[in-house]
Image (cartoon, grey):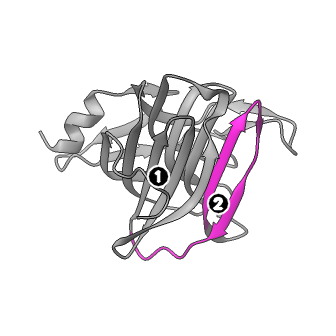
Amino acid sequence: MTKSEQSWSDMTWLNEPEDWSIDSAGVLHATSGDKTDFWQRTHYGFERDDGHALLQKRSDDFSAVLTFEGDYETLYDQAGLMARSGPTAWVKFGVELTDGVTHLSVVVTDGFSDGSAQPVRLDGPVTLRMTRLGNVLLMQHRVNDAWQMARLAPLPDAATRVSVGPYLCSPQRSGFQARFLDWSLTDPQVKELHE
């Protein structure tokens, strides 16, 4: 059993997709259900909590690191990392297709969702790191061999215990495919904003 395969076995699905598997290399393959999403109220008015997330509980500070890729084809196809304390208190950090371009995206939800995005060119898998330091989350992405900050955000609802792990959803369709290549959840790997 590979390191990632063992890690996946310690986790629990929120909204388990109908189609998912772990291959012999420990890669988690998942396909989204129809019109799945995580979003609360802002601009669109709807409350959606039916995206797919494979989560592990953590009550102290941590660094979650995820390497993944997806077949981004339709508006809002997305995958990445989620930290969650409930249906209206969570953060998702990933890659999302918007206006035909892949974007590095962060949504912080504390009753209402906000969204920020910056275009990102994909030349292969993406590696993200989400670090909890007390009541904040530091979100970074790896560029070459260096970590760059994407966002620093308050932890919604100042929750003590959160669940963290990979997520995927496809608000406009079914059948978005993502592959989660590597995953780790450890004590914080960084304690300062700038290394």
Question: Quarter-wise, where is residue 9 in the image?
Answer: top left
- As measured in the structure, the alpha-carbon distance from the residue carrying label 2 to the one carrying label 1 is 11 Å
Q: Position of residue 123 (x, y in %)?
A: 43, 77
Q: Is residue 19 magenta?
A: no
Against 152, is 59 above or below?
Answer: above
Residue 18 can be seen, yes or no: no
Say what secondary structure mark 2 lies in.
loop
Residue topped by disc 1: 177
- Could you tell me which residue is drawn at 40 percent across and 27 percent down? 58
Q: Magenta span: helix, strand or loop, mainly? A: strand
Residue 39 can be seen, yes or no: yes
Q: Which mark is residue 141?
A: none
Q: Position of residue 72 (x, y in %)?
A: 55, 62
Q: As shown in the figure, which amino acid type bears the numbered disc 1?
A: Gln
- Could you tell me which residue is drawn at 45 percent across and 35 percent down? 164
- Dot 2, crowdedness within 10 Å: few (<14), some or many (≥20)? some
182 lies left or right of 100: left
6 lies left or right of 127: left
Q: Between residues 30 and 182, which one lies in front from this camera angle?
A: 182
- Dot 1, crowdedness within 10 Å: few (<14), some or many (≥20)? many
Q: Between residues 59 and 172, which one lies in front from this camera angle?
A: 59
Quarter holding the C terminus is bottom left
- Could you tell me which residue is drawn at 41 percent across and 28 percent down? 60
Residue topped by disc 2: 74
- Could you tell me which residue is drawn at 48 percent across and 59 percent down? 140
Which residues lie in the magenta part?
Answer: 103-124
Q: Position of residue 88 (x, y in %)?
A: 69, 27
11 lies left or right of 130: left
Q: Between residues 167 and 188, which one lies in front from this camera angle?
A: 188
Say what secondary structure mark 1 lies in.
strand
